[in-house]
Amino acid sequence: MGIVNLTDDSYFAPSRVDISDGCAGLVRRVAAMKEEGADIIDMGACSTRPGSVPVDAAEEWRRLAPALKAVSGAFPGTAISVDTFRASVAGRAYDLIGDFMVNDISAGEADKDMLPLVGRLGLRYVAMHMRGTPETMQNLACYDDVTAEVASCFRSFALRAEDNGIADWILDPGFGFAKTVDQNYELLSNLEVFRGFGRPVLVGVSRKSMIYRLLGITPEEALPATQVVHFKALENGADILRVHDVAEAARTVALYRRLAHSSI
């Protein structure tokens, strides 16, 4: 899953795509990602980095609509994911481009209308674990057992998904969202626990603070270390990697598959 940020404040600046003068650059970026091996293009127009205050729904849609139209038009059949926690934005996206995947950082907690909408439209859905909001979440990283408590949240979510007719959903433990550095690595070590839900597991650790703060570097310097964590995530059961650097992640996947095959 290749990340396209239609924002001006995402924590990794090179992931931002400016479409103020049109979508030609965006189309080139997506074409490169697809050529490098991206299976899904994840487009977000509202930053959710720690400490951020989300833009309103109108601004999110103003940024997102032309990008969705351009990408769906240039690459018909491409799997598109929309990174939003707002049902109104998801509904307008469906009206504009038809079927797509909703990538919701709140697992339906931020907007009571999201899960009913997803179920009604039959959309694929990524449910991510988070506490609070991007503005408050880093003050809420208090767990007795982070793996057990995150798993408990997904057991509750599974019931809500069933109640709303959501048949196709993906589990994202929410690395970096209301978790300390140590808690992130504990979740990574225990990723197999989440395989027990029988759902694809998505891991989003690309260039995140759990990597760069641990090593005393910047997000811009964190590409090699990110691939180490990606490899470990694959070993522990990740099905989808959400990444800034598609080519490097695709090579990591290829090496993982080759080494896993060699060890049989």
Image: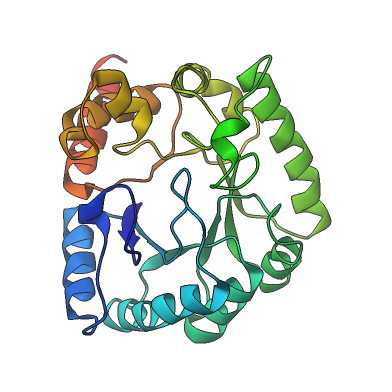
x and y, in percent, of residue 255 in the image: 20, 29
Q: How many numbered discs?
A: 0
x and y, in percent, of residue 156 in the image: 78, 39
Q: In this view, does 129 lie to the left or right of 5?
A: right
Q: Residue at x 44, y 22 (%)?
A: 181
Q: Which residue is drawn at 54% across and 34% down?
A: 138
Report the colour scheme. rainbow
x and y, in percent, of residue 5 in the image: 33, 61
Q: In this view, does 6 lie to the left or right of 197?
A: left
Q: In which quarter of the image is residue 9?
A: bottom left
Task: Please determine whether, in this image, residue 13 is positioned above or below residue 232.
Answer: below
Q: Quadrant of residue 153?
A: top right
Q: Which residue is drawn at 47% across and 34% down?
A: 176
Q: In this view, does 231 lie to the left or right of 184?
A: left
From the viewer's side, name the closer residue of 90 and 123: 90
Task: Please determine whether, in this image, residue 96 is positioned above or below residue 176.
Answer: below
- The image quadrant where one finds the C terminus is top left
Q: Which residue is drawn at 24% across and 80% down?
A: 23
Residue 20 seen in this snapshot: yes
Task: Please determine whether, in this image, residue 190 is positioned above or below residue 2.
Answer: above
Q: In which quarter of the image is residue 216?
A: top left
Residue furthest right in the image: 163
